Structure formats: C-alpha cells, structure tokens
C-alpha cells in the first residue's frame, strides 16, 4: 500500500505470470530492473487465467528506491483494459 500511495508510475513488461507471482521488468533513469511480485493473496481481483496478464502494464515504484515496485495491490492495478 505504501508504494501505491507514494509511488510514481512507469511502464513495465510482465513476461511471466502464474497464480503465485508476476515476473516483470522495467527501466527507471537508465537502470533496468527485473523483479517479481507475490500475488497469491490478490487472486480475487485478478483474471481467472494469470497468463492473460502478460504484456505491457503500468507499475508504481518508490522514488527513493526504484527497485521497490508493484503492479497490483488491494487498491490499484496497472493492467490496461483489453480491447474487445
């Protein structure tokens, strides 16, 4: 929640997703980050098939520690709406 409240937005690429975690990469000020986020507790707000999350998303990062980031939390999600 802290990163959601104080975070700055950026763009990330989710390259792996399952029911336990998202693995994604992003770049801030020329520095590349590869990280993961535990999502098991957030499954109720995610699509039924986590693999549908692959691709470009918004993320929030701590401006004082850009390695600390989130793609989703209880109050926000960086997933873009899919065109139908």
Image (cartoon, helix red, strand yellow):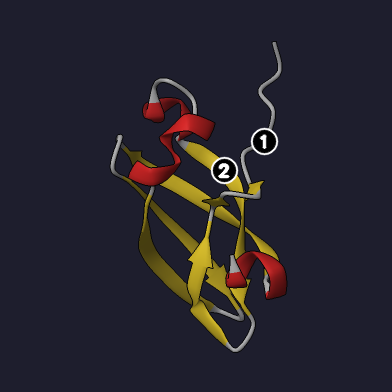
**If you read the primary sequence from the N terminus, does the residue marked by circle 1 or circle 2 appear first?**
2
Tell which of 55 and 9 is nearer to you: 9
Q: Residues within 10 Å of mark 2 (few under 14, many from 20)?
A: some
| Residue drawn at point x = 28 percent, y = 43 percent | 20
Q: Nearer the viewer, mark 1 or mark 2?
A: 1
Cα distance between the residues tagged 1 and 2:
8 Å
Rendered-image quadrant of the N terminus? bottom right
* Quarter assignment of residue 29: bottom right
Count of picture labels: 2
Name the side, left or right, on which 38 lies relative to 81: left
* Percent position of residue 10, x then y: 66, 62
Tell me, yes or no, whether the two marked residues, 1 and 2, touch with CB atoms within 8 Å: yes
| Residue placed furthest toward the bottom | 64
- Label 1 element class: loop
- Label 2 element class: strand
| Residue drawn at point x = 70 percent, y = 69 percent | 5
* Percent position of residue 33, x then y: 43, 70
Say which residue label 1 marks: 80
Rendered-image quadrant of the C terminus? top right
| Residue drawn at point x = 69 percent, y = 28 percent | 81
Q: Residues within 10 Å of mark 1 (few under 14, many from 20)?
A: few
34 vs 6: above or below? above
* Percent position of residue 75, x then y: 65, 50
Say which residue label 2 marks: 56
């Amino acid at each position: 929640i802290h990163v959601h409240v104080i975070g700055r937005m950026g763009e990330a690429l989710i390259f792996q997703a399952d029911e336990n975690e998202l693995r994604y990469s992003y770049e801030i000020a020329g520095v590349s980050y590869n990280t993961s986020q535990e999502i098991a507790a957030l499954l109720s707000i995610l699509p039924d098939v986590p693999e549908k999350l692959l691709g470009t998303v918004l993320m929030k990062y701590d401006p004082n520690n850009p390695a600390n980031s989130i793609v989703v939390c209880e109050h926000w999600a960086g997933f873009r709406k899919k065109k139908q």
